Image (tube, rainbow, N blue to C red):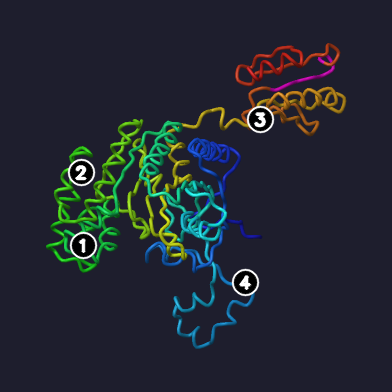
Amino acid sequence: MANKPSIPKGTRDFGPVEMAKRNYIFDTIKSVYALYGFQQIETPAMETLHTLMGKYGEEGDQLLFKVLNSGDYLKKVSDDELKERNVLKLQTKLCEKGLRYDLTVPFARYVVMHRDELQLPFKRYQIQPVWRADRPQKGRYREFYQCDADVVGSDSLLNEVELMQIVDTVFTKFGVRVQIKINNRKILSGIAEVMGERDKIVDITVAIDKLDKIGLDNVNEELRNDGIPEEAISKLQPIIKLEGTNDEKLATISEVLKDSEIGLKGVEETKFILDELKKVGLNNEIQLDLTLARGLNYYTGAIFEVKALDTPMGSITGGGRYDNLTGIFGMPGLSGVGISFGADRIYDVLNALDLYPKETITGTQLLFINFGEKETEYCLPVVSKARKAGIRTEMFPDKSKMKKQMNYANAKGIPFVVLAGENEINEGKFTLKDMNSGEQKLVSADELIDIVKG
């Protein structure tokens, strides 16, 4: 007996209903991006490892899916190297490509390659799958879609303000209550500076970014393991536990960072963003969270993260400013800022809260029953007319038993069914059945279309 087929862990199939829901998510996000002047691009699923490696920190590099070279991928490897089993060394000879980890680094590569064609500032959006060799769990997949918007070629903090408005607008359209968290990597650098551990900024931010997942005690233990002295860890505690309004937190952290130039710059930038957002008004809360670090090394300014309030789920949107990212590809001095919607987690949130509008997941609206060749010939012109009127319409292809055809309509949730036999043909009419109420009416073709559309 053949083995039952399966799919890799951390991936999912999506049937027609799921795809209708996902397209609702993508279409909603696309429509908001378009409102703000963003244009769509796409990049390959695979990038060279030279493009990907070293951009996500050590942990991120370990989560990259590497792709074996095609053909005889062992031809450059000696027997001694195989016996040595040095994974990192072998990797450089066996793999030249990897699946993209996110959409931001490929976008930076795109900007550098196409710089002569771009009008700056360049506002792009991109909706494509990404892959991470992570341990699959609830809300975390190895293959998932991101819906990114980025602006490059502008230092203005108005870009950050607009991106927060985009986040607010998208989740308002979805009907999801969220909390938008904001921080600034310059503030975190300032905190490391006043702790006396400026060189340990990466270790500190990676550790405190895990606060929600592992708790304060484990964060402190991780800092100790990274060689951070107890005195420095003690200085961090009141900052991590800081509470109050955004303005109160800014005032307190300004005092803490009064001797750190970079820290005060981060406070200034954050205050500008928050003050401008007060003027435009948001439907959702935006909160300054000094423990928000986002572990990706390329963020240099404002950072953002969004969480749903009414169902347990990890971050469903994130992003930030990355002034030096394109410099890695030989194009220094080009500033960028972006956000990424996690479509798969948003999908799960909308499912959990039952927030999909009914019309977005309804498929066929009208089914014509097939009674035979003569009846089909009578119905086909009206089938065509209904489709031209924008009604999603099917003609059952086979002359099957009436019960089978009605079961088909019920299984697909089709709200209206048309029956046209000898009597209807003689009268030039159609019997229209409402599958929800069971009511039947004898109607003309035009009346049929008006009822279904109405």
The percent coordinates of residue 295 (x first, y second) are 34, 57
Nearest to the observer: residue 404 or residue 149: 149
Specify few, some or many for label 2: CA neighbours under 10 Å numbering under 14, 14-19, or 20 or more.
some
Image quadrant where one finds the N terminus: bottom right
Kindly identify the amino acid type of the residue bearing the numbered disc 4: Ser
Q: Earlier in the sequence, mark 3 or mark 4?
A: 4
Q: Amino acid at mark 2?
A: Leu
* Magenta span: 417-424
Report the residue marked by disc 2: 250
Mark in the foreground, 4 or 1: 4
Task: Please name the amino acid that badge 1 sits on.
Answer: Glu
Q: Is residue 219 magenta?
A: no
- Residue at which label 4 appears: 70
Look at 16% across and 63% down and name the residue there.
196
Q: Amino acid at mark 3?
A: Thr
Q: Separation of disc 4 and disc 2 at Cα?
A: 54 Å
Q: Disc 1 designates what residue?
A: 221
Rounded to the nearest whole Å, what is the CA distance between mark 4 and mark 1?
44 Å
**Dot placed on the residue nearer the N-terminal end, 3 or 1:** 1
